[in-house]
Image (cartoon, grey):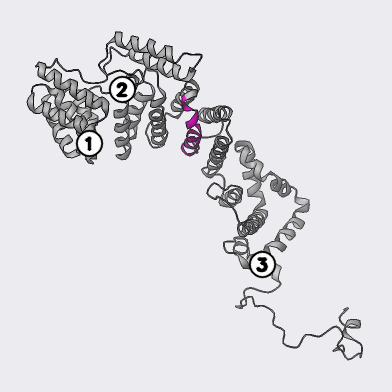
């Protein structure tokens, strides 16, 4: 609410007539034709304030007791408008000391002390404020924020619960309350608070957009652990929010896409949740046109599909390790050595899959049906694996290159799981207790023009060299 007043250049206690006058003045400066974006901001702030006059977003205090107190309040508001927080705090303290019957001075003093970093004094005064009216939801909220600033998280959670029970629904308060619930594993309780945020009957401004994104982030994170899962409801609301406030949230869409990728990795194929996620990704990809945005969003989409495979218990480690080779989410750039190792790792995984052909083909069928984006990455090799007539040739070709690279890399699984194949490749027994040793020549090398050692009298190149 404070943001709407600031948008119209008004104080928080502005009357309906002042709000209307400020609105028409700004509309003349920012017409729909000359500045449509700013016009929308002004229009929404006006509509918000006009519709919310019956719902105050701050405590209501009685009239000040003395004309001097009124004058001091004007001075406090002037310092606040100038953003001189030191003078603002000192003026509040002087007013409270002089007029202790006017509790609004104590309330403003706590606000000022929090802004100045005087967290200890703010806590002490907030506790005093609550003691004067324990049933005031705004006082309980101020106490909760003061405890949070001081690091008293358990006390802050208790104050949040009291303020919420009394009906406090301030957006910043609800987000803070939900974060404390998350820290204390009270997931259902925290989600209830965040649902109050996203279901708030109001028009959101550009400045409030980050708070909405934060609320959806908390909902998606806590939904995975809550007793009652509400993913469909969250996704449906998120899609409507993105669509309705497209002009405000466009810059946050890459962030939202990464959020979805990490929060929805376990959704089952063709469920309602799956369809909702695909719908949101499709909308984000259509909306974002800048190259950098598209790159981030495409990475998020790939991460989402890959993580769904990782969380699928039907896909075993052999196939997962092969799929991993086609993703580089955590690698900024490959050098030549990385590429050589990648070739070795691909050969290692493909040889293992040839040995486990029947099982791998069953899993490939699951990929093709439920994870088509991932199956497309390995479709060529799966086709070769299905074609059993050329399997022997394929294996020998892979084994030849694999045996050449294997001594230079660690982490290979094929020879470890199938030692007989290593025996076949190098032509020696591995179980005789000897290590593989390089061949060492015991006699001098024979030159091609030397006499042949067979005793024929011919040159070596015309005799046994040819044999």
Question: From the viewer's perspective, is 166 left or right of 308?
Answer: left
Sequence-first tag of 2 and 3: 2
Q: CA distance from mark 3 to mark 1?
A: 72 Å
Q: Are marks 2 and 1 in contact (CB under 8 Å)?
A: no
Can residue 366 be seen here?
Answer: no
Can residue 452 be seen here?
Answer: yes
Give the quarter of the figure containing the C terminus.
bottom right
**Front residue of this view, candidates 243 and 325:** 243
Location of residue 442 by image quarter: bottom right
Magenta residues?
248-268
Looking at the image, which residue is at 90% across and 83% down?
463
- Looking at the picture, how far across and down is residue 16, in whole percent? 29, 9
Question: From the viewer's perspective, is 302 left or right of 94?
Answer: right
Residue 2 badge:
2
Circle 2 Cα neighbour tier, 10 Å, few/some/many (<14 / 14–19 / ≥20): few
Q: Are marks 2 and 3 in contact (CB under 8 Å)?
A: no
Question: From the viewer's perspective, is 136 left or right of 24?
Answer: left
Looking at the image, which residue is at 32% across and 26% down?
171
Would you name the residue on which mark 3 appears? 422
Q: Nearer the viewer, mark 2 or mark 1?
A: 1
Would you name the residue on which mark 1 appears? 116
- Looking at the picture, how far across and down is residue 177, in whole percent? 29, 32
Q: CA distance from mark 2 to mark 1?
A: 19 Å
- Looking at the picture, how far across and down is residue 20, in whole percent? 34, 9
């Amino acid at each position: 609410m404070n943001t709407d007043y600031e948008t119209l250049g008004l104080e928080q206690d502005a009357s309906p007539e002042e709000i209307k006058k400020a609105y028409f003045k700004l509309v003349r400066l920012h017409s729909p034709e000359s500045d449509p974006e700013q016009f929308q901001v002004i229009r929404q702030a006006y509509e918000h304030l006009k519709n919310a006059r019956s719902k105050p977003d701050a405590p209501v205090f009685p009239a000040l007791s003395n004309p001097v107190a009124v004058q001091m309040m004007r001075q406090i508001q002037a310092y606040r408008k100038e953003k001189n927080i030191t003078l603002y705090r000192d003026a509040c303290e002087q007013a409270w000391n002089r007029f202790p019957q006017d509790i609004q001075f104590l309330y403003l003093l706590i606000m000022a002390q929090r802004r100045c970093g005087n967290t200890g004094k703010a806590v002490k005064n907030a506790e005093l404020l609550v003691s004067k009216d324990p049933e005031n939801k705004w006082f309980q909220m101020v106490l909760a924020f003061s405890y949070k600033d001081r690091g008293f998280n358990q006390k802050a959670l208790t104050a949040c619960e009291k303020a919420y029970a009394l009906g406090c629904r301030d957006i910043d308060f609800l987000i803070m309350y939900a974060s404390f619930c998350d820290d204390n594993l009270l997931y259902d309780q925290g989600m209830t608070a965040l649902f109050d945020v996203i279901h708030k009957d109001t028009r959101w401004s550009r400045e409030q957009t980050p708070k909405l994104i934060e609320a959806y982030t908390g909902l998606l994170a806590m939904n995975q652990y809550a007793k009652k899962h509400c993913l469909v409801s969250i996704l449906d609301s998120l899609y409507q929010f993105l669509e309705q406030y497209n002009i405000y949230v466009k810059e946050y869409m890459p962030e939202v896409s990464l959020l979805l990728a990490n929060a929805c990795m376990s959704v089952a194929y063709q469920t309602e949740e799956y369809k909702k996620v695909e719908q949101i990704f499709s909308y984000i990809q259509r909306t974002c046109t800048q190259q950098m945005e598209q790159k981030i969003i495409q990475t998020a989409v790939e991460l989402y599909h890959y993580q769904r495979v990782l969380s699928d218990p039907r896909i075993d480690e052999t196939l997962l390790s092969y799929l991993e080779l086609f993703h580089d989410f955590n690698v900024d750039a490959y050098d030549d050595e990385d590429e050589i190792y990648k070739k070795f790792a691909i050969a290692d995984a493909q040889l293992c899959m040839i040995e486990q052909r029947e099982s791998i083909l069953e899993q490939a069928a699951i990929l093709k049906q439920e994870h088509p984006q991932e199956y497309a990455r390995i479709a060529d090799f799966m086709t070769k694996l299905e074609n059993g007539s050329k399997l022997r040739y394929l294996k020998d070709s892979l084994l030849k290159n694999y045996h050449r690279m294997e001594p230079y890399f660690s982490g290979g699984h094929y020879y470890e799981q199938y030692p007989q194949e290593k025996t076949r490749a190098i032509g020696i027994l591995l179980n005789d207790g000897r290590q593989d040793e390089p061949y060492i020549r015991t006699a001098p090398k024979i030159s091609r023009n030397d006499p042949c050692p067979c005793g024929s009298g011919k040159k070596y190149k015309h005799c046994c060299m040819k044999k």
